Image (tube, rainbow, N blue to C red):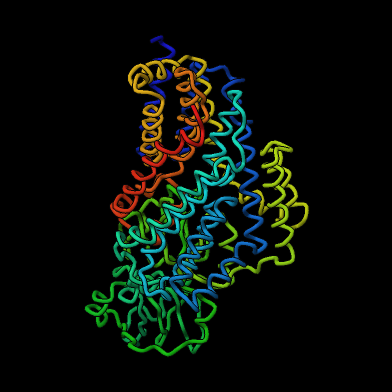
């Protein structure tokens, strides 16, 4: 082993450790790794930066835009409304249809967009089917992953594996070359979810309505400010019950009018305050502060402009790593956070200083007109069923035609997939299906940065000989058992890595290694590349291995153990299927 190989492998181990620790975002880890490789001279600058111009980077960026075009014009929403119609007539048939439609759409559209749109529908279906939402949300995420492995453009991991293959001079993977094996995975996976998987999921979330699901009735109440209160005539920020009780005022009603709870608002006797506070503690102290609990507060017409909605932080949210206090959430978004579901914990009090993570679910009170402004940002997914911005039905057919054209051109091989996707994304903007700023916001730039940087690691492993060294030792240990055993071990290793670190980073590392292993064995690299593609997308055991799992984690109020309970049998089943079937579809 040379010094260059040792340093490269040491950096690889350190990067994997940082990915697993989740101390830094994946794109930051990838950039640290690339910068170290460039500064140390382990990889030439022109080669190390070549990853950012890889076909996979261009294609993935274009696919984000194409998916956003289908969503904005209402193509996906049209299918969702069809499922709502079916749910009113046959709830369980609608659940089956939901998983099938999710899998189908995810074969062609970014699956995070599909899951984001279908989460509110899934919550509504759970009420109709009289099931806990947690029993349906996890299968929704899994169905999107199953559909993604059916086509080249179904998931970013497939495109990454293809990009690495093309970079190494291997014939590109076909658009529908994934489909036969992918359909087997999808069919068996959906049968498992509908017959066994749903039974293994506990009823974590009691109801679809956020107020019931987060037990807000014990924390949201209305009190009347009596003449005995010391706060009368004082600013809201100076009121004793705010300073001493930590009571948060959400609304003020005075003479039938709703007033914003501004810090310098002067309080008056008779004001009706809607507050967030532990109800038991408030009952014990209400007399000392001149407050009177209102048991059955009258309906206020002024309540209508405000909404109680549930939001989920996206993996690309700018709030990840910040706290509600440091981000000045209320001033920035015009919304008051009432509850926070952070990883496995529910927080109804003292959550302002909890560092936020992707997948965290929050319940907020917000003015109706501010909601649409908030949803235009890429930071949140709306979970509650609220009438959103109107789609563009006139452009829906055009968007569908553009997407179909991209698939046709790429599958027929008339132009490379990257070119077809790039032209399709441009057509979405030029035809008015998307506004330019919407197209830019749709792209997950963090993913592209991470991918470009990780491809630099693959080049370093090839340049320094680290990949060859690993291959020689791996083949020396398992090569005598035959290529099928090596393939099976490769699938298992990829599957385990993708559970604890980014599936995209795993795809980059393992695809490059797969090509070297195949060359050392003297066999075709294609079976190994498809093993990496399928295994990197089959992340069923943890909520952090795949973005859609992260998205449903907080909403479904899951525990980590739920993913292991449902996902482990599915992972093992797919491992056996891959070992038996991949050599039949792609001969060594």
The front one of 153 and 520 is: 520
Give the x, y percent position of residue 470. 40, 19
Q: Is residue 256 above or below residue 398?
A: below
The front one of 567 and 96 is: 96
The front one of 80 and 549 is: 80
Q: Would residue 91 be found to the left or right of residue 78 on screen?
A: left
Q: Is residue 505 visible?
A: no
Q: Is residue 531 above or below residue 231?
A: above
Give the x, y percent position of residue 376. 60, 60
Q: Is residue 343 above or below residue 250?
A: above
Give the residue at x 36% y 78%.
231
Quarter in which the N terminus is drawn: top left
Q: Would residue 494 be found to the left or right of residue 530 on screen?
A: left
Give the x, y percent position of residue 131. 36, 71
The front one of 505 and 191 is: 191
Q: How many marks?
A: 0
Furthest residue in direction left, as rendered: 284
Q: Is residue 225 visible?
A: yes
Give the residue at x 54% y 39%.
158
Give the x, y percent position of residue 83. 54, 70
């Amino acid at each position: 082993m040379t010094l260059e190989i040792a340093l490269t492998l040491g950096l690889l181990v350190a990067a994997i450790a940082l990915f697993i620790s989740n101390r830094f975002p994946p794109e930051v880890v990838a950039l640290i790794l690339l910068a170290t490789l460039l500064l140390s001279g382990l990889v030439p600058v022109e080669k190390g930066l070549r990853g950012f111009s890889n076909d996979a980077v261009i294609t993935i960026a274009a696919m984000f835009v194409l998916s956003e075009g289908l969503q904005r014009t209402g193509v996906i929403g049209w299918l969702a409304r069809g499922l709502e119609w079916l749910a009113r007539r046959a709830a369980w048939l609608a659940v089956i249809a939901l998983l099938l439609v999710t899998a189908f759409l995810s074969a062609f559209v970014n699956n995070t967009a599909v899951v984001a749109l279908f989460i509110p529908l899934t919550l509504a279906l759970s009420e109709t089917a009289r099931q806990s939402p947690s029993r349906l949300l996890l299968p929704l995420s899994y169905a999107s992953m199953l559909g993604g492995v059916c086509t080249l453009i179904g998931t970013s991991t497939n495109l990454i594996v293809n990009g690495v293959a093309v970079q190494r001079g291997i014939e590109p993977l076909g658009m529908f070359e994934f489909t036969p094996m992918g359909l087997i995975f999808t069919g068996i996976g959906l049968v498992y979810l509908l017959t066994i998987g749903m039974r293994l999921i506990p009823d974590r979330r009691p109801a679809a309505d956020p107020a019931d699901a987060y037990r807000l009735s014990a924390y949201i109440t209305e009190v009347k400010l009596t003449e005995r209160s010391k706060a009368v005539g004082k600013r809201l920020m100076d009121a004793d019950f705010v300073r001493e009780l930590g009571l948060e005022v959400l609304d003020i009603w005075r003479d039938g009018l709703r007033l914003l709870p501004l810090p310098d608002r002067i309080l008056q006797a008779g004001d009706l305050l809607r507050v967030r506070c532990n109800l038991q503690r408030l009952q014990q102290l209400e007399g000392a502060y001149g407050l009177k609990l209102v048991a059955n507060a009258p309906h206020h017409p002024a309540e209508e402009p405000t909404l109680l909605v549930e939001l989920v932080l996206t993996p690309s949210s700018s709030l990840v790593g910040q706290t509600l206090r440091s981000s000045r959430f209320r001033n920035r978004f015009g919304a008051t956070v009432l509850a926070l579901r952070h990883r496995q914990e529910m927080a109804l009090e003292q959550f302002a200083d909890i560092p936020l993570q992707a997948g965290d679910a929050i319940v907020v009170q917000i003015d109706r007109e501010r909601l649409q402004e908030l949803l235009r940002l890429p930071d949140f997914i709306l979970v509650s069923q609220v009438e959103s911005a109107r789609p563009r039905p006139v452009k829906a057919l055009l968007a569908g035609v553009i997407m179909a054209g991209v698939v046709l051109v790429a599958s027929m091989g008339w132009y490379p997939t990257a070119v077809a996707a790039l032209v399709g994304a441009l057509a979405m903007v030029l035809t008015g299906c998307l506004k330019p700023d919407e197209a830019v916001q749709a792209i997950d730039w963090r993913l592209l940065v991470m991918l470009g940087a990780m491809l630099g690691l693959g080049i370093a492993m090839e340049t320094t000989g680290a990949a060859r060294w690993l291959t020689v030792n791996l083949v020396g240990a398992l090569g005598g058992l035959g290529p099928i055993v090596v393939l099976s071990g490769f699938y298992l290793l990829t599957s385990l890595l993708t559970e604890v670190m980014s599936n995209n980073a795993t795809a980059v590392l393992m695809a490059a290694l797969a090509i070297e292993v195949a060359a050392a064995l003297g066999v075709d690299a294609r079976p190994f590349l498809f093993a990496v593609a399928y295994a990197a997308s089959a992340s069923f055991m943890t909520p952090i291995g795949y973005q859609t799992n992260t998205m449903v984690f907080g909403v479904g109020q899951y525990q980590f153990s739920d993913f292991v309970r449902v996902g482990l049998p599915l992972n093992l089943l797919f491992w056996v299927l891959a070992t038996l079937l991949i050599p039949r579809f792609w001969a060594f």
